[in-house]
Image (cartoon, helix red, strand yellow):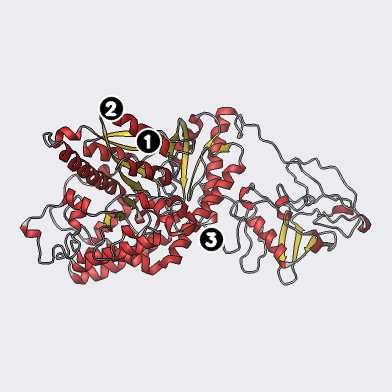
Amino acid sequence: MDHKEFRVKAKELVDYMADYLENIRDHKVYPGVQPGYLHKRLPDHAPEMPEKWDDIFKDVEDHIMPGIVHWQSPHMHAYFPALTSYPSIMGEMLSSAMNVLCFTWASSPAGTELETIAMNWLGKLLGLPECFLNEKNDSQGGGVIQTTASEATLVSLLAARTRALMELSALNPDMQSSELLGHLIAYCSDQAHSSVEKAGLIGLVRMRYIESDEHQCMRGDKLEEAIINDKAKGLVPFWVCATLGTTGSVAFDDLREIGPVCDQHSIWLHVDAAYAGSAFICPEYRHWLDGIELVDSFAFNPSKWLMVNFDCTGMWVRDSNALHRTFNVNPIYLRHENSGKAIDYMHWQIPLSRRFRALKLWFVLRNYGVSGLQKHIRESVRLAQKFEALVLADQRFEIPQPRNLGMVAFRLKGDNTLTEYLLKRLNARGYLHAVPACFKGVYVIRFTVTSQRTTNQDILDDWTEIKTVASEILKEMFGSENGNIVVSKKPRISLKGSSPADRSISSPVVSSTTVKPVACTDTNQLLVPMTPSRQFRSKSVDETDLKLDDAVISVDIKNNEITLTPTDSKSILDARDVSELKIGDRISRAFDLMDTNNMECKEAGEAKLTIKGPGSYIKQIIQQFSEGPFDAEDCKPDPGRAVATQSLKQRADAFCKKCLHYKGVNK
């Protein structure tokens, strides 16, 4: 490929990438392939002769894409976010083109200094203490971009190990470092990430796991008890890893309790905030940072939730000299005349070479700004709250641990097997993807809002998918979609017609014609209810299988009227003696927010009923029917998936978003 072909094909590739992200909902989030599928499709040896780019890229579409887990999909709820964004992609593209190696200042002055600046920006944005920044010439602290949080954890452990061995060697000059190493012991919560265990294995030190409390949190008293017991055995505690936002349940270890314990025993305290650290750009979530001034190192992943594509982990240390002592090798070919005057990041990490990762971070911080990034974090949390409310409204499910930030851990009530079956079948269908966790023997499904493209409708679609699959499993195992759970039913209240003199202020619909009550024998029919005493119900916790098969709704926003017209030969007020409007089941919530003081109802002949009120109430009715605001995004329907009703019955029903006229049911 020469520069002429590159100009053309690279532009085509940019269009392909933009189309892919824009139409990400066209893909099932989880592929339906089996191990070895690609080996059967591709040759077992490299081509002898050059191949055309178009042929190569055709194989991407034909063979690679079918096996991709689409991490940018709004229906990706596994693990934690691994987001990207357009400014981040462009930063990565430009960095790839320059391909500079930023291991010393001399190897890339701009790359080195931009990293220091970007990490100072980000540290201030998180609210980190000044001791973690590198803005003054005599500053001992500073930030560095590592590849992953796992590597940041290992770097901190190795730095702490070096410090501990130096102190022990001074006290025991006759002992070798290998002998002293066997006395070292490190600590973390039993909820800590697996990378902490791996760091201990690589560092050749034993790891003590502190039992977490009922909220999956490591507490100071438990840690201190373990440290005192180990010291009594002749062991030397040297490193503690606290987690802010555990993988299983986004639990937070108590820094205010742990910090003083580590300080008292001269132990290096490292904080792993891989996922939750991004949330600290919002002041309302910084209470979990209480005690950060007692910490020696702190790390989180902008590549998770701040839309900077992988790899990019921010790590800050109070004393960079500890890193220098651990990783400083200085052969003559890496020295330069400005050594010691500027940061050489090769002394802050395990590998020598490093990419120009600061560029994409800098692009994102500038293009979104503080307000844009905060808006993104808050929206993800809001959507997780919506999903939490949906789960809590279904008596078959439970949430065994409190929701924190953008992740909900839920399960079917009963034996773990039910939830395991549910997760396995959900992933096999491929319409959403999630992974499990286990809290003291309780199996749960982790549901994390991972995409900035996720909307209210996506959450409703995913919940409908979960409910549908759960019903299938419970029917298979118990013969009922409720399983062995006794589900209480809400009482049905019918609206009785009355003369004007008998009208009650509690009625949301008042007929101008005196009608006689009749018995209702249709069990699928819900009668228009009387308004409860100023009761407000959240739309997010109600059933979403509304129907309005017997009537068509038209809305006159200008005159603040909503009209119900029957779709068959029967009149809503048939024969003037029917007081109960047969308009489908579960329509009651449409009237829950109606203020009867501002409502009136008039009969327009025998064929229709018109409700008149302030425009805000008319809009509330429509939003109750449509499960969201008028401008909610529509997803392309997939005939194989159970989707939530954005209008009244499945996705076929919808209001016209221009004139707000209900278009009825597509047959």
**Nearer-the-camera pick, 82 or 554:** 82
Residue carrying label 3? 633
SS class, disc 2: loop
Question: For mark 1, does the 10 Å Cα neighbourhood hold few (<14), some (14 to 19), or many (20 or more) residues?
Answer: some
Q: Residue placed at 44% from the left, 41% from the top? A: 427
Does residue 178 lie above or below 356 as drawn? Answer: above
Q: Residue placed at 71% from the left, 69% from the top? A: 557
Question: For mark 3, does the 10 Å Cα neighbourhood hold few (<14), some (14 to 19), or many (20 or more) residues?
Answer: some
Q: State the CA–CA distance, disc 2 to disc 3.
A: 62 Å
Picture coordinates of residue 599, whole percent (x, y)? 80, 62
- Tell me the kind of residue under disc 3: Glu
Q: State the CA–CA distance, disc 3 to disc 1.
A: 52 Å
SS class, disc 1: helix
The picture quadrant where one finds residue 505 is bottom right
Does residue 43 lie above or below 97 as drawn? Answer: above
- Tell me the kind of residue under disc 1: Glu
Picture coordinates of residue 45, whole percent (x, y)? 16, 46
Is residue 129 visible to the viewer in this orientation of the structure?
yes
Q: Residue placed at 43% from the left, 56% from the top? A: 280
SS class, disc 3: loop
Mark 3 or 1, nearer chain start: 1
The picture quadrant where one finds residue 503 is bottom right
Q: State the CA–CA distance, disc 2 to disc 1.
A: 14 Å
Residue carrying label 2? 233
Residue contact between numbered discs 3 and 1, judged by CB atoms under 8 Å: no
Residue carrying label 1? 224
Q: Is residue 85 left or right of residue 460?
A: left
Which label lies toward us, 2 or 3?
2
Q: Is residue 551 left or right of residue 172?
A: right
Is residue 89 visible to the viewer in this orientation of the structure?
no
Q: Is residue 258 left or right of residue 442?
A: left
